[in-house]
Image (spheres, rainbow, N blue to C red):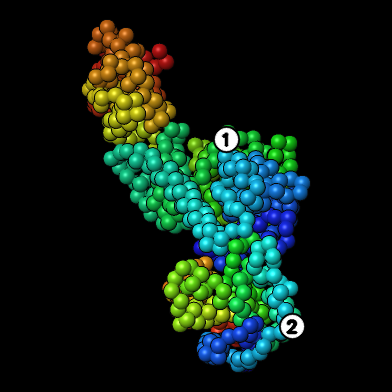
Amino acid sequence: MAEKISILIVDDEESVRDSLYNWFIDDGYKVECAENAKIALSKLEEKEYDIILADIKMPGMDGLEMHRRIKAQNKEPIFIVMTAFASVDTAVQALKDGAYDYVTKPFDPDDLSHLIRNATSQIALKNENKRLKTSISSLVDVEDLIGESEALKKVLKQVESVAQSSSSVIITGESGTGKELIARAIHANSSRKYFPLISVHCGALTESLLESELFGHEKGAFTGASFNRKGRFEMADGGTIFLDEIATISSKMQIELLRILESKTFVRVGGNKELTSDFRVICATNRDLKSMVNNGTFREDLYYRLNVVNITIPPLRERIEDISLLAYHFIGKYCTSMSKNLISIEPAALKHLERFEFPGNVRELENMIERAIVIGNGKEIRLKDLPMGKEVLNSSIESIDDVERKHISMILTKYDWNISRTAKALNVDRATLYNKIKKYNLKQGI
Amino acid sequence: MKTLTIILLSCGHFEKEISKSISEDIAREFKSNVHFKECTIDLSTYYNPRRRQYDANAILQEISSLYATDSTKAIALLRVDLFVPILTYIFGQAFLNGNAAIASLHRLRNELYGLKKNDLLLTERFRKVVIHELGHSFGLIHCQNPICIMRSSTYVEDLDQKEIHFCNQCKTILIEKHQSAD
């Protein structure tokens, strides 16, 4: 591990720099020296160091000021101050400002060894913590993939088989069907699961913002770029990048994307250094990319590069049998988060949910359940707690005949007065349907 | 493989037994010829009255320029208390991948820590410091193996823990260094 730790020594005394340099080199660390804070800061702009060992008293900028400037750059190396006996007060001030520790010159060799050993274990812990946090946050919510329908089982089977490969995946499906959840499930079941899953909502960003977001930027690349910033591709190194609403990206971005997908190398905005990243790409869209390719709004080469595997998530109305499972799942989820007792759902309300079209799919169902829990009586979700329930209740004074007439009329219109298809949808025979049309005096176009 | 020569420089009086055992250790561990020489440098030049210690960096520099060559490494055996500016004391010092090293037995004596005099232990500690510093001059860095001679030692007790041999990993690196030097 010691081989990977880099140390920057900042001291105006050459003998101090040399002694420390020799000491750390013997231990196998990567060591560099700077004779003043200005040089140290310029070195820090070029690369990052794990540990900085700096003298407090230096001509020009002192160690404390240097520490403040490093912190302002959002860099987090372990900062250790070196001090003479006379300046212990300033060392204490450095500790208050967030320095890791201080040592009084000259130090006992054993103290120095302990200090660096502790600092390196702190670095290892910090890195491990970061990695674990990322992997945990990537795994959460995968449990939201609820359902027993054949349509969902088919999707999950595809997820399982595609997860182990590194192929690009396009997830298609209507808005709210859970495209991001599927992307998370692929990532969580892949060998990349201990590395980050980075999500980018392409539709929410302008072209220039998206470029800087994806590739990162160098300090001064544009107004407001005060610091170097890693791009999402860089952050996804070892893991997966999920590009939502891929159909919305401009033709310029399509070319850039194609280039990075082919070479896995890129340059930060305003930079000239070529960086590499090992990532897997998963895209999602609710548009028909193939027809966009046909009408020339989406590049064909990019489409084929991304569309190695295609997973289509069925809309909720095509998996009605999952609605009750999902409803109970969301009841459990929101009752827990709102610290309420678990409530049930009235059979009439559930039946009504199962008949509803859900243009907003699972997301709409989830919002409905959340709203119903908030406004409900705290015991069960009633029909009137659902947004479409009021309509149903208000029209409940109609007679059965009225309801039947309206329903048959609606289905006839839906199937363009095709008697066979309407009869099939209503689950009656053609003769019955003709009788009903005659009974209610239904006419096409009315 | 070319046989290297290592010059053992005595700065002050050392019993014949100590010099002999150190010579044997060096010849065995580094497969080299060992030449014994009296060191003529005036140590008082390197005395720092404020610290009441001797400047190890300056002595090392002097040994390198006076006794070592590209094909000859030199190690000076000392009895004085050594320091480098940033550390309170050191047992020895070497140029990593260089041609010179120094080792002192001043801080290795039991009496310094209020313990009973033990000449045998003192010699053994000194032999370990010499081989360790020469190891650095051959490009070896500190080893994590607790009994390897290249394990970092900041206390005498640390020295007593380790053996007077290189671990297999360090030995392999040493052989590679030898071969690349040919």
Q: Chain of mark 1?
A: A
Marks 2/1: CA–CA distance: 72 Å
Please, what is the three-letter code of the amino acid marked with disc 1?
Gly
Image location of residue B167, percent across then percent down: 47, 79
| Disc 1 residue crowd, few under 14, some 14–19, many 20+, Cα 10 Å | some
Res. A90 mark: none
Q: Is residue A346 above or below residue A179?
A: above
Image location of residue A157, percent across then percent down: 35, 50
Q: Which residue is mark 2?
A: B66
Q: Is residue B69 above or below residue A308?
A: below
Q: Is residue A140 above or below residue B102?
A: above
Is A86 positioned to the left or the right of B124 in the image?
right
Label 2 vs label 1, nearer the camera: 2
Quarter the C terminus of chain A occupies: top left
| Disc 2 residue crowd, few under 14, some 14–19, many 20+, Cα 10 Å | few
Q: Chain of mark 2?
A: B
Please, what is the three-letter code of the amino acid marked with disc 2?
Leu
Residue at left offset 45%, top offset 82%: B120
Image location of residue A43, percent across then percent down: 70, 53
Residue at left offset 43%, top offset 49%: A132
- Observer-nearest residue: A32 or A328? A32
Image label count: 2
- Residue A274 position by quadrant: bottom right
Is B75 positioned to the left or the right of A313 in the image?
right
- Observer-nearest residue: B37 or A241? B37
- Residue A53 position by quadrant: bottom right
**Disc 2, SS:** helix
Q: Which residue is mark 1?
A: A203
Image location of residue A428, percent across then percent down: 24, 26
Residue at left offset 63%, top offset 50%: A85
**Disc 1, SS:** helix
- Observer-nearest residue: A355 or A210? A210
